Amino acid sequence: MTEVSILGEKLFINGEPTYSGRFFDGFPVEGLLFNVRAVQATFDDLNPTTRQFWMYPDTYTWDPERNTNDFILALPSWKEHGVLGFTINFQGGGARYIPEIYNNYLNSAFTLNGDIRADYAERISRVLFAADQLGMVVIVGFFYWKQANKMTSENAIWNAVENGMQFIKSTGRKNILVEIANETDVPFLFPIFKPQNAHKIIEHFKNRYPEFLISTSQGGINPETGQGIPTPEMVQVCDFLLPHGNGATPQRLSQGIDLIRSIPVFQKSPKPIIINEDSTGIENLDTAFRNYVSWGYYDQGYNGEPRIHDIWVTDTANHQRETQIDLLSGFQTPPVNWTINTPRKKRFFERVAQITGFKQIDETNIEHII
């Protein structure tokens, strides 16, 4: 069984620091967690009106089981490049940003009252098991703002977290880092997600489930406005910190990291800084690890509308809906090709392999999981 733990700013897997003893270009790599934003690994859409937008080009249907199975089959190749973690989310993430789609699709492991959907939970369970078998860490998020805002009340939110925690506890997995909500400083409707309150829900569930490491994330870091910088209360209660790098240049990212490290409570009790959402920009990856910060690859993929998240992607005209499985790009707009099949993906995975010094892993029989 794979178990993740933390000591100071380092992450450990089964009692050993990640990338044990590794330095690259004179910078320490040991204890970091290179990761991928894979929040659609268990995606489904319960709205029949918008479900059509996720059709596979070879079958003209959407298939959530195929999506999860393809994801699991891709994981060994991620691991052999040195990627030891990935983020999933009970409510996924932004799949497409055209308003009539973005406002209406329904992707959530939670009902509107906060109960758990059995079919969704089964897919999450398979993903956790696959990662466990491979010795990988899963950052498990519960809420994405667009889906959370559809829930009936703040009581439903608390109920959902309780049910989510009970569920992941029931799996017996110990390779989990919990992310209560993705980007609490975006427009969640419920007051508990406001930056000045978000630490309260973390503190509550840390007391109820001390066996889990828990945090929440903030939006794209901006040292000039303070956006994405956790509050001192957040730094105090979180087991690890999850700033995001969306929209940040390397200079701004470095300044934001310095701001976090300057917070007195962080200096008193340092903890891992894990960026689990940034961009396709390898320049930001290099900035992060040289500042001893873990980094997460975020690749939206084709979507047919302007790229609003990734300053490193300028060829928007080339990111239209593909008609062949092999050409599907990105990891966040379903249907997803979870393999390392595009130049951007290859650049990221090959850079991580170079930094970590990873060699190919032993053959792992993953097919029995799906």
Image: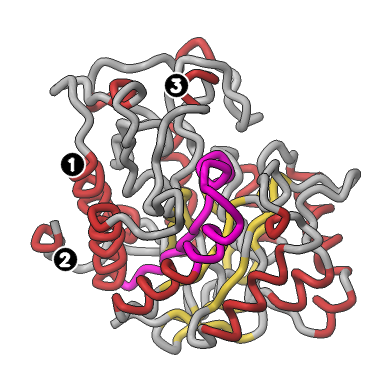
Which stretch appears magenta?
Answer: 135-161
The foreground one among 80 and 27 is 80
Give the residue type at disc 3. Answer: Asn
**Residue 165: horizontal and vertical position, in percent?**
44, 72
**Residue 17: horizontal and vertical position, in percent?**
50, 81
The tag earlier along the polypeptide, 1 or 3, is 1
In this view, 137 is above or below 205: above
**Residue 107: horizontal and vertical position, in percent?**
39, 41
**Residue 33: horizontal and vertical position, in percent?**
52, 66
Element at label 3: loop
The tag earlier along the polypeptide, 3 or 2, is 3
The foreground one among 367 and 312 is 367
- Residue 35 in the magenta stretch? The answer is no
Residue 143 can be seen in this image? yes
In this view, 1 is above or below 108: below
Mark 2 highlights which residue? 364
Give the residue type at disc 2. Answer: Thr
In this view, 275 is above or below 132: above
> What's the mark number on residue 359?
none
Viewport quadrant of the C terminus: bottom left
Give the residue type at disc 1. Answer: Arg
